Image (tube, grey):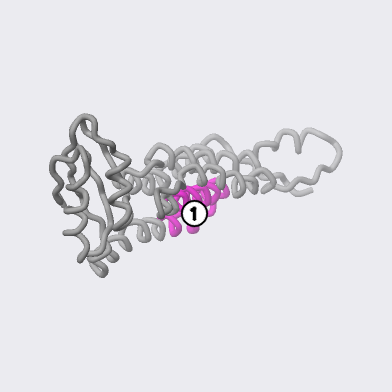
Amino acid sequence: MHSIPALGWDGVLIRLVAAAALGALIGLERELDEKSAGLRTHVLVCVGSTLFTLVSAYGFHDFLVSGSAIVRTDPSRIAAQIVTGIGFLGAGVIFRQGASVRGLTTAASLWIVAAIGMACGAGFWPGAVVATVVALFSLRVLELVKRRALPALTGRRMRVDLDADAQISEVIARLERFGQVDACRRFADRLEVEVEVPREARGDVLADAAGLAGVREVRWTG
């Protein structure tokens, strides 16, 4: 009779720590861009996927070896549900803003982090490491290539000085007429916005936003 695979404390520790490290690399990249799902979220997803995979493959070892009857089990049964479950978490970071949809890239990063965690749990180290490298290349290097190759479509930072009673929604709605708003932060009497607009429309954006009620000054800062 073939022996049933088991995993000791050292094996579990190595796989969980490796999952946390690989997930942290991708999460840090998202954190640097101030995305809704950042470092902690990616680490938790990766470690959680690893643990589910470990439970699925090794968690019932005592049950399998204690009985006299032959028990057949699928080591991927629990882990397979991660593929479905991660979709609900990914959907939570996708939202529509005006005519644009945001969060798709972050949802995809959560999806691949879950896959990396499953690879760590299964001990498939080549897949886990290569997938992490490819994900980082796609998220960071390809973004830099895009900014250099398509400078007219890259985002720029805008500062909007506001009166106390100014309506932020009106400012955002007006900017979305010209391009995609990637981020928005409110600081007391000013608004910092990251917006992607065609190069030739940047002057029109300033003039149009400056004409809104409650807006004192508008200028590009980056």
Q: Residue at x 65, y 42 (%)?
A: 56
Q: Residue at x 29, y 58 (%)?
A: 178
Q: Which residue of the protein is positioned furthest toward the right in this rendering?
A: 69
Q: Is residue 197 left or right of residue 74?
A: left
How many other residues sit within 10 Å of disc 1, few (<14), some (14-19) or many (≥20)? Answer: some
In percent of width and height, residue 86 lies at: 55, 45
Q: Main secondary structure of the magenta part?
A: helix
Q: Residue at x 41, y 57 (%)?
A: 135
Q: Is residue 75 left or right of residue 184?
A: right
Q: Is residue 35 left or right of residue 110?
A: left
In percent of width and height, residue 122 lies at: 57, 49
Residue ID for mark 1: 125
Q: Nearer the viewer, residue 64 or 191?
A: 191
Q: Nearer the viewer, residue 9 or 102?
A: 102
**Which element is circle 1 on?**
helix
Vertical arrangement, residue 89 with respect to residue 142, above or below? above
Residue 186 lies within the magenta run: no
Residue 116 lies within the magenta run: yes
Task: Kindly indicate the quadrant of the structure image that contains residue 62.
Answer: top right
In percent of width and height, residue 185 lies at: 27, 39
| Amino acid on which the number 1 mark rests in the picture | Trp
Q: Residue at x 52, y 42 (%)?
A: 89
Q: Nearer the viewer, residue 106 or 48?
A: 106
The residue segment tinted magenta is 106-132
